Image: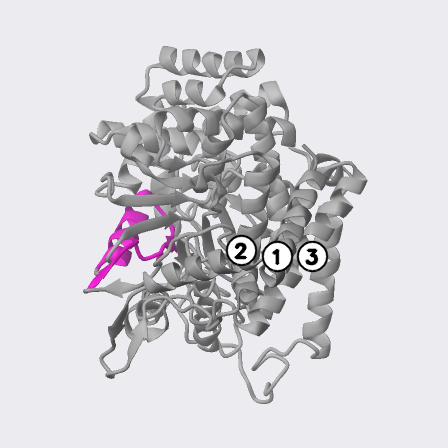
């Protein structure tokens, strides 16, 4: 299916909304039907008194009574939890009623540094006092590129900027104490994602956890890597094949685990505008939908299992970005692909505040930036949310900065009444509606351009995505330089400002790196060489025969290290080469 089918489905839906509005103006029976439905929906909302004494409804809906207004609202936005999910995929997200939330808090804090044991301690620190245990794992460069901590050419990178994981034993140590059904673990890893996911699954089983109950995500978004991050290990087509191997297996055996997380965050961090982030990320998501359907998977199973990952930055478009992509996705899945299960139509998303918006100068100003970006994000009602630490421009986050970042979310959820007391109070505000509509139109326009080139894969091959992102990145830099994009303490009120020297930098000592190297070498030395050889052969055979490589990876991950896994598959598939 081409993106033009998705464009047509959304255009047809818009026409249906307009037809419903017109019908409400001339058809008395339809007017009465709409008014009755509206009274029932609004009457079921419920209300409660607040500590200040005022009584408010639990969910904010517009004060409208004309059936045509009702028709437009329900068609354009949908009631919370109802198609097309412009306001939210849940009817009562973030509300606290009688001291309880109906859904988990979305807080998910990113962590990873040094050794598995060091990161495990940071995880334990982060979850203290949290209502929900949601972890997000950052890996070091060696791990992301499928290299072991014993690689002499990359000794300096061991444990820097993320956790070093090379062996199955490392996965056991990294998540020790978190192999419970109420814990959700996200892993930001792409190239060697199959190996890392297999290691975590096998570690969970060793600790007694049922794969059918394990929760979390692996990023595994090769399309995004080709667009922005360049950390693929294998050619793009082979990387997509591997991602779909894991996707297909998890659909059968680990139904609560999301093995692909379609990511716009890194596209934005590379320089994309909010519109480009939304359009390119959705386009990539539809690549995976098509791949899954080509394998014979049911569209409802596919739609339920593809979560997304977006930025929330300082640009005003973020006030409605997630709402807009939910609308495009919902219409596409239902009307273009035929998904009749509402769970498949509901785009689930993790949102992270923008690292690109943080600056070293007057570094504590980043706390305010992140708080405002969190507010934008929460107006879109995401399912998971990460707040960056203020010191990230210069270091892996320190413990104190991580705590402030986590507290920022708690303040919004626990102290501020805007989310715990009433849902959707800015939902269809006029300005937000204009942004929402503009984003939808812009996404569809990009889809038309991509299809004119020949589809998503051809557009990637011709460098369209990269070129668009590069132009936007260059323009952003120019705007900061000439002051048309204001950055406080950088190009506004900058006189007398200094780079902050007081923030400690987290550095991994060489003795820790040497210990990591030695641990990996000892692990390798203690293995049965025959099992290692057999494991490598099994991986190569599965790759050569076009079999499910994730199943083979699960079978060998206890013996085959991350670097051995990478080399075995690169010998069959070749190595990713970035297109220039």
Contact, CB < 8 Å: mark 2 with mark 1? yes
Mark 2 or 1 closer to N-term? Answer: 1
Can you say whether 482 is above or below 125 in the image?
A: below
Q: Which residue is drawn at the image coordinates 58% and 67% (left, top)?
A: 433
Foreground residue among 10 and 284: 10
Residue at which label 1 appears: 23
Q: Which residue is drawn at the image coordinates 39% and 46% (left, top)?
A: 163
- Highlighted magenta segment, given as a residue range: 99-128
Quarter of the picture containing the C terminus is: top right
Q: Residue 509: image x %, image y %?
A: 38, 53
Q: Residue 277: image x %, image y %?
A: 62, 54
User: How far apart in space, not on screen, are marks 2 and 3 (Cα)?
Assistant: 32 Å
Q: Is residue 575 visible?
A: no
Q: Is residue 440 magenta?
A: no
Residue at which label 2 appears: 30
Near mark 1 (Cα within 10 A), the count class, few <14, some 14-19 or many ≥20, is some
Mark 2 or 3 closer to N-term? Answer: 2
Mark 3 or 1 closer to N-term? Answer: 1
């Amino acid at each position: 299916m081409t993106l033009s089918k998705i464009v047509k489905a959304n255009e047809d839906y818009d026409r249906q909304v307009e037809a419903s509005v017109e019908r409400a103006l001339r058809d008395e029976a339809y007017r009465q039907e709409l008014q009755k439905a509206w009274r029932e929906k609004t009457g079921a909302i419920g209300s409660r008194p607040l500590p200040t004494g005022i009584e408010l409804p639990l969910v904010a809906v517009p004060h409208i009574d004309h059936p045509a207004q009702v028709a437009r609202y329900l068609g354009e936005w949908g009631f919370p939890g109802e198609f097309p999910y412009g306001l939210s995929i849940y009817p009562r997200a973030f509300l606290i009623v009688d001291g309880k939330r109906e859904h988990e808090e979305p807080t998910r804090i990113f962590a990873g540094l040094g050794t598995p044991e060091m990161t495990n301690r940071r995880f334990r620190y982060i979850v203290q006092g949290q209502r929900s245990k949601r972890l997000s794992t950052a890996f070091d460069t060696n791990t992301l590129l499928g290299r072991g901590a014993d690689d002499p050419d990359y000794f300096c990178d061991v444990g820097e900027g993320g956790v070093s994981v090379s062996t199955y034993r490392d996965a056991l140590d990294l998540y020790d104490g978190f192999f419970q059904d109420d814990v959700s673990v996200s892993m930001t890893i792409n190239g060697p994602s199959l190996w890392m996911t297999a290691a975590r699954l096998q570690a969970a089983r060793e600790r007694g956890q049922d794969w059918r109950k394990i929760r979390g995500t692996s990023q595994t978004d090769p399309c995004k890597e080709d667009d922005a991050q360049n950390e693929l290990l294998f050619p793009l087509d082979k990387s997509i094949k591997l991602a779909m191997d894991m996707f297909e297996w998890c659909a059968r055996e680990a139904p609560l685990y999301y093995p692909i997380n379609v990511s716009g965050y890194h596209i934005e961090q590379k320089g994309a505008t909010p519109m480009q982030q939304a359009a390119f990320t959705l386009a990539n998501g539809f690549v995976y939908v098509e791949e899954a359907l080509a394998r014979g998977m049911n569209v409802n199973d596919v739609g339920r299992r593809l979560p997304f990952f977006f930025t929330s930055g300082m640009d005003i478009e973020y006030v409605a970005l997630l709402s807009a992509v939910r609308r495009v996705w919902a219409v596409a899945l239902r009307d273009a692909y035929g998904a009749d299960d509402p769970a498949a139509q509901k785009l689930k998303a993790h949102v992270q505040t923008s690292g690109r918006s943080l600056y070293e100068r007057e570094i504590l100003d980043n706390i305010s930036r992140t708080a405002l970006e969190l507010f934008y994000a929460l107006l879109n009602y995401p399912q998971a949310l990460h707040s960056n630490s203020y010191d990230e421009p210069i270091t892996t986050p320190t413990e104190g900065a991580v705590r402030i970042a986590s507290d920022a979310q708690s303040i919004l959820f626990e102290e501020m009444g805007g989310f715990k007391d009433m849902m959707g109070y800015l939902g269809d505000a006029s300005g937000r509606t204009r942004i929402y509509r503009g984003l939808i139109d812009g996404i569809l326009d990009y889809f038309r351009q991509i299809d004119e080139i020949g589809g998503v894969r051809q557009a990637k091959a011709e460098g369209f995505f990269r070129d668009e992102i590069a132009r936007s990145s260059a323009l952003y830099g120019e705007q900061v330089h000439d002051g048309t994009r204001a950055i406080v303490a950088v190009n506004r009120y900058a006189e007398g400002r200094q780079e902050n020297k007081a923030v400690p930098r987290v550095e991994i000592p060489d003795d820790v790196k040497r210990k990591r190297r030695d641990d990996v070498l000892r692990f390798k030395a203690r293995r049965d060489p025959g099992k290692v050889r057999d494991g490598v052969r099994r991986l190569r055979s599965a790759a050569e025969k076009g079999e499910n490589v994730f199943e083979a990876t699960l079978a060998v991950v206890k013996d085959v290290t991350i670097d051995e896994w990478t080399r075995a598959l690169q010998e069959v598939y070749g190595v990713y080469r970035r297109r220039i």
